[in-house]
Image: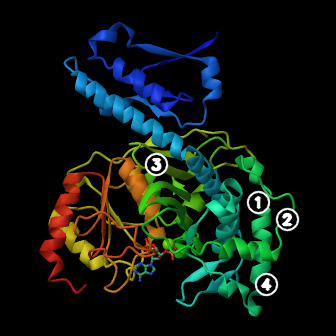
């Protein structure tokens, strides 16, 4: 039987994670029992071909988490075994949901990219105004319809409950007929590509009523019990219409806790320096020196499930390539920088969304010296999870209530990548109270590590009373 061998500390595609963890525990250089076996391990080719549903695995990460010392006691081995069993059971519990959610977000990114291209090249006639005057585009409704339709097809509509940002009212008005037509066409164009993403599209193009129904089905109010999906079809609408950063955010929330987080970031640059530039410059440079078709220049989908201790990033599907799992996924980890002088903090672009002056004071008091990185949308969560910045702070004006779909996916991803996310009082965000993060204390603080986090929480307390927030 042909064997697939891989040297230790390289990334191993197509190996079931629990198998790697199991081997890795014994392959630790300190583990005397199997020391002579520590250079290679082998997996039968047939197993490799059949068990490809999981992402690639970084052995070095598991070394860090799971290495046993020579004096490892039987009880710590048992604890490891228990954790392995827990991880395996959770893995099988969420594997279909994760697989479908990542594919669906890939499709949503594909849709958004097309709409954003046409928005930038045409005028802004495709931008509508919602009651709260924020711009909303064809993409918002089209993504919501597409995601809702695909989740219902994959799990059965009776099993799918979705909390999402857009409502169907403004789209159903008589004067929105042109917009509705554009949404129906965009949804059908996207769903026609479903097989490329490993999903099944409709046999016939969806009619207007089916599209409206898919959008309006996202009418769950969340809450503390059961399962629901939280969707922000286009988070960072301003970034989207400006041709800049935005995200498609999908999370599965179970009994009030986000358990799966998937974030599509179509404009995320692989070279982190580009995050500080307006996306316009990136586009110009890309035109002058176009990336090769194989290079991973920008755009990713990040994902994680709670309790796995892993977060992953895969490239967006390009051209008419097929999504073959795990689609070159790479593990991501938060930065190891603890020194505030070396750390970068990111925050919302719009000062109406978060007080820039308050965060500047906090930054100064904890010794953060670098210029803030202002990035639209939940891409800020991606920035921390990937290790491209160390701190994310958001302090909205008093009275603003944060919504669960603006944070759920990012929280799971940062936590599984090794970071910390809390409110400004140091408490976990509460996703169990409906569509808002009720009881949020002052603001949101996400950090790569606990030390930085603690410093910032202390600084908030010290300066809050003198702030005008
Ligand atoms: N006044 C106010 N204060 C705080 N937050 C607000 C406010 N208004 C809106 N929002 C929400 O912020 C989402 C935009 O993302 P950010 O908060 O990261 O801001 S920014 O786009 O970088 O400026 C944005 O998400 P989208 O509506 O999906 O763009 C909103 O949910
Ligand atoms: Mg949003």
Q: Residue at x 25, y 69 (%)?
A: 424
Q: What is the CA distance from the residue labelled 3 to the residue labelled 4?
A: 40 Å
Q: What is the CA distance from the residue labelled 1 to the residue labelled 4?
A: 20 Å
Describe residue 259's horizontal placement relative to residue 265 as left or right: left
Measured as percent of width and height from the top left, residue 180 is found at 76, 80
Q: What is the CA distance from the residue labelled 3 to the residue labelled 1?
A: 26 Å
Label whose residue precedes the other's in the sequence (1 or 4): 4
State the quadrant of the N terminus.
top right
- In the rendered view, would you say 467 is above or below 201? below
Label whose residue precedes the other's in the sequence (3 or 1): 1
Task: Estimate how packed mark 1 is, as few (under 14), some (14 to 19) or many (20 or more) residues with alpha carbons within 10 Å.
Answer: many
Measured as percent of width and height from the top left, residue 330 is found at 50, 40
Q: Which residue is mark 3?
A: 305
Q: Is mark 4 within 8 Å of ligand 1?
A: no
- In the rendered view, would you say 294 is above or below 349? above
Q: Which residue is mark 4?
A: 178
Q: What is the CA distance from the residue labelled 3 to the residue labelled 2?
A: 33 Å
Q: Which residue is mark 1?
A: 191
Q: Quadrant of residue 159?
A: bottom right
State the quadrant of the C terminus.
bottom left
Closer to us: mark 3 or mark 1? 3
Q: What is the CA distance from the residue labelled 2 to the residue labelled 1?
A: 8 Å
> Do labels 2 and 4 touch, CB within 8 Å?
no
> Do labels 2 and 1 touch, CB within 8 Å?
yes
Q: Quadrant of residue 123?
A: bottom right
Residue 136 appearing in the image: yes
Name the mark on residue 49: none
């Amino acid at each position: 039987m042909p064997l697939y061998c891989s040297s230790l500390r390289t990334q191993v595609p197509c190996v079931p994670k629990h198998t790697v963890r199991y081997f890795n525990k014994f392959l630790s250089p300190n583990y005397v029992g199997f020391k002579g076996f520590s250079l290679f391990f082998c997996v039968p080719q047939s197993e490799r071909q059949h068990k490809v549903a999981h992402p690639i695995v970084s052995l070095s990460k598991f070394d860090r988490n799971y290495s046993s010392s020579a004096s490892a006691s039987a009880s710590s081995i048992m604890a490891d075994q228990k954790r392995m069993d827990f991880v395996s059971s959770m893995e099988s519990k969420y594997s279909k949901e994760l697989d479908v959610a990542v594919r669906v977000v890939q499709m949503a990114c594909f849709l958004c990219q097309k709409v954003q291209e046409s928005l930038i090249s045409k005028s802004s006639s495709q931008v509508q105004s919602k009651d709260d005057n924020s711009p909303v585009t064809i993409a918002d409704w089209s993504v919501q319809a597409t995601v809702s339709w695909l989740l219902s097809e994959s799990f059965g509509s009776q099993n799918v409950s979705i909390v999402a940002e857009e409502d169907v009212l403004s789209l159903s008005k008589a004067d929105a007929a042109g917009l509705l037509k554009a949404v129906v066409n965009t949804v059908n164009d996207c769903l026609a590509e479903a097989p490329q993403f490993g999903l099944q599209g409709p046999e016939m193009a969806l009619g207007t009523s089916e599209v409206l129904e898919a959008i309006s089905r996202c009418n769950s109010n969340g809450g503390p019990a059961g399962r629901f999906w939280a969707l922000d079809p286009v988070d960072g609408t301003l970034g989207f219409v400006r041709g800049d950063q935005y995200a498609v955010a999908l999370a599965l929330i179970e009994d009030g806790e986000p358990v799966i987080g998937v974030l599509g970031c179509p404009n995320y640059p692989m070279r982190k320096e580009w995050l500080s530039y307006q996306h316009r410059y990136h586009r110009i440079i890309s035109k002058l020196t176009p990336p090769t078709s194989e290079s991973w220049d920008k755009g990713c989908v990040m994902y994680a499930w709670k309790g796995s201790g892993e977060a992953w990033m895969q490239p967006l599907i390009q051209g008419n390539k097929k999504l073959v799992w795990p689609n070159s996924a790479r593990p991501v980890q938060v930065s190891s920088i603890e020194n505030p002088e070396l750390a970068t903090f990111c925050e919302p672009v719009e000062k109406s969304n978060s007080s820039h002056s308050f965060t500047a004071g906090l930054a100064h008091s904890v010794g953060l010296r670098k210029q803030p990185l202002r990035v639209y949308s939940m891409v800020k969560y991606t920035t921390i999870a990937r290790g491209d910045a160390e701190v994310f702070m958001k302090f909205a004006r008093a009275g603003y209530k944060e919504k669960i779909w603006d944070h759920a996916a990012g929280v799971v991803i940062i936590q599984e990548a090794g970071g910390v996310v809390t409110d400004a009082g140091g408490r976990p965000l509460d996703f169990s109270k409906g569509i808002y993060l009720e009881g949020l204390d002052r603001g949101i603080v996400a950090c790569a590590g606990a030390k930085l986090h603690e410093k910032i929480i202390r600084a908030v307390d010290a300066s809050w009373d003198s702030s005008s927030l």
